[in-house]
Each structure stands twice: as C-alpha cells, then as structure tokens.
Image (tube, grey):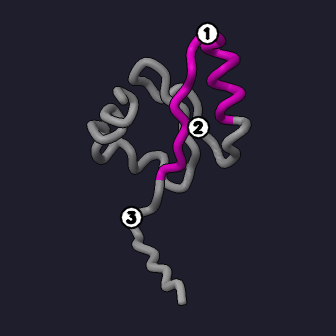
Amino acid sequence: MKEFEFVLSMGDKLGEYVCQWIAIVDNEVVSEGQNAKEVYDEAKRRYPTKTPFIMKVPTDEVTLLRIA
C-alpha cells in the first residue's frame, strides 16, 4: 500500500497532525481534522474519482490494555 509507505516516510512532519484524522491522496495530505467523516468527505469532494487513505495520527504515548 503506497499510502502507508508515504505515511512512514513523513517522519517528523507527521507530528503536525497528532490526534487528527488525515486523508491522503497521491502521496499528499489533502484533508485533516477532528472528524473522520468530514475529513473523508472533503477528500472525496476534492478528488471524486480517487479513494482516499484515511487514518488517525496517534500521539507518541503508549497505552497498554490488560484484558482479564
């Protein structure tokens, strides 16, 4: 998946989007925000024939879950 490789290559620039949803089309962040549906809708409005890659950028904190 080329979009995932693009995300990995962003390095520190990804920090601009911590805790936000982003949409990537053709190796470019084309939309960002707090609401996944709004981010997706904006990406589709701008690129109606493309399928955007949507993800939430995590913080650099680690969360551990213990399931009993």
Q: Amino acid at mark 2?
A: Glu
Measured in 3D between alpha carbons, the distance from the residue under mark 3 to the one under mark 1, in whole angstroms, is: 34 Å
**Dot 1 corresponds to which residue?**
49
Q: Which element carries disc 1, helix, strand or loop?
A: loop
Three-letter amino acid code at disc 3? Asp
Disc sitting over residue 60 in the figure = 3
CA gap, disc 2 and disc 3 = 18 Å
Q: Which stretch is magenta?
A: 39-57
* Residue 42 sits inside the magenta stretch: yes
Q: Amino acid at mark 1?
A: Thr
User: Which residue sits at x=58%, y=44%?
Assistant: 21
Q: Secondary structure at mark 3?
A: loop
Count of numbered labels shown in the rendering: 3
**5 vs 52: above or below:** below
For label 2, the SS is: strand
Per the image, the residue denoted by label 2 is: 32
Q: Is residue 54 magenta?
A: yes
Query: Residue 68's image quarter?
Result: bottom right
Who is closer to the viewer here, 11 or 56? 56
Q: Nearer the viewer, residue 42 or 49?
A: 49
Front label number (3 vs 1) = 1
